Image (tube, helix red, strand yellow):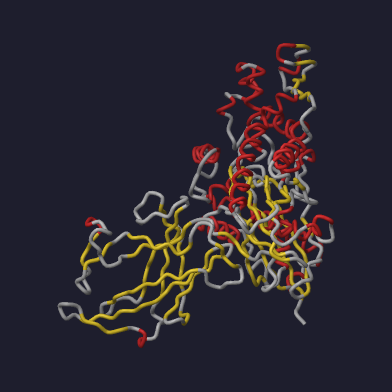
Amino acid sequence: MKPNRLIVGLDYGTTYTGVSFCETAGNGTGDEHIEVVHDWPSQHTKIGTKEKVPSEVTYQKQGLLWGSLIPPNVQRHLWTKLQLDPTQKGELVKIVREVSTSSEHPNKQPVEIIADFLAQVKAHLIKNLDQKYGKVLWRSMNVTLVVTVPAVWTEVAKARTLEAVDKAGFNTPEFPQLKNILMTTEPEAAAIYTIKSLRGTTQNSDFAVGDGFIVCDMGGGTVDLISYRVTGLGPTVIEEATVGGGDQCGGSFVGRAFLKWLERRLGTKDFVNIVGCRSEDVPHTSLCKKAARMLQDFTLEVKSGFSGSETNHLRLPSPLNSIEEDEARGIYDGEITITPEDMIEMFEMPVRRTYELLGDQLDQLRKNKKVKPKKYVFMVGGFSESPYMYEKIRMFVARCNGLQAVKPAYPWSAVVRGAAAKGLEGAKKSAIKIRKCRRYYGTDFSPPFEAGKHKEADSYVDAYDGLKYARNQMAWLLTLGQDLSTSKKVHAKASFYISLWPGQKREYTMSLLASNGPKAAQLSVDKAVYKVTELTVDLSVVPKKEFMAKRSPSGEPYHTLSFQVAISAQSSLEYSLLVNGKTYGTVTAKYD
């Protein structure tokens, strides 16, 4: 009989973070109750976050403050998660610039800042586990930690995420029986949770093999989507039917649009008097007390409940709260009027961009001949709880093939609940059968030079055999949109041939390259190609009998070896060394 396991789910989000846990016997039944941490500390009961805590941290003279313990007008690190990905764009560029020019711990790297925040999250989780199981019992159980990441995350970003998680103390000193750390994408976790939550419902019985559905994860910073196809029933098994997509168009952008609207309505002079600057220059990392309070009131009292028809009134800070009536600006008794038309304008960008992302998923689904009816769009994430956003998406997808927009129970915490559900899966009962490759992966190589095929500028003469070769040629191992079976241990093999002089270190270093473009580049120097990681292959453990003795044209002795680097593409890439089909030693990945 297998001992009980403790599953911990960690969803470190762009704007909010959630943690879940559950206990299971053996490989689990799938019916285990998943608990979500609710009692996050808050200095302001008005913004108690219940299922999640703000992904924010600040370093003050009195020490580190995090989450809802940070006063509204204090500068803080936020959206730090997106700094883990080297491809910075959109609002992130402004945030990085603000943080880099601030005087608050200017030398701290994003991984360190995130680790400091997650260390507080970990301490609060341990407090919950101690209360639930006692300090001794849970520490005796084998622990599986499941960490969620965006579907479009690069390998560098995944590696940095795990580094931050480890530095935060999600390791064996803090969790003595930590046996396994899994990584899963946020839409996949949401899909697993959705399937679990639908068991026994009419929607679940309505599924047939071949049906397609879309998971739309709408957060504060980003909206991520991916589509699935049902491949089995009883229990439901699914496969990715499209390559996932996403963008920075989450709920926080409505707040930014509110500030721009407020400047237009009040006039620049009064707006600057309250906020301290023009709306386009308002910092992301800190606001003055008046502006912070107004934005908080707008989010909680206006944005969260807006369904499309309400007129709202928001209290203005001093000295504007003394204005009794200003009809031209819509101010009455110190309150400014926000009409439905005003709110619709503030939601315009997130609505439009989400439409575009949904349209792209539907286009991909139409091209996938294995997907028959497309039935549901499952909306999860905090922004999906907006009545207006839900209604706009519901109407949009209804016009597209008659799809139904559905919110499962607890949509805000769907991802972190799904992370725990992922940990409950046994090795042979994954709910996900096939994933789609997110980009091209490959290596550069030097084949024998062929006139007419290769450029003379890429040619060189090899010092070992004196033959002419062409450098910078690409060999793609995994392609964009390729089906990757979750039950398969190896998804690609890269073949190499190395020559070693006597006394030369038996080691081979190679670069794994990638491209996000729609077409595969032919040359490694193409601007669309970038380095994912540097792999170091330890050949010292390979038996001498596998090496072949040779002599150069000048009579110098050397040895050659043919070997392969195997790549397993699960939620992250894993590597191994093969010589004549046998696994040897280790392959070490170094991310810059």
Q: Nearer the viewer, residue 394 or 181?
A: 394
Give the vertical position of 173 relative to 386 (above or below). Answer: below
The quarter of the picture where the N terminus appears is: bottom right
Residue at left 72%, top 17%? 320
* Percent position of residue 201, x then y: 84, 57
* Percent position of residue 524, x then y: 36, 56
Place residue 564 in its image quadrant. Answer: bottom left
Q: Nearer the viewer, residue 10 or 212?
A: 212
Residue at left 67%, top 48%? 217
Q: Nearer the viewer, residue 451 or 322?
A: 451
Q: Nearer the viewer, residue 189 or 518?
A: 518
* Percent position of residue 134, x then y: 80, 67
Give the vertical position of 366 relative to 441 (above or below). Answer: above
In the picture, measured across the screen, residue 571 lies left or right of residue 334, that is left
* Percent position of residue 245, x then y: 58, 49
Residue at left 57%, top 54%? 243
Give the vertical position of 559 relative to 404 (above or below). Answer: below
Number of numbered markers:
0
Give the vertical position of 311 relative to 232 (above or below). Answer: above
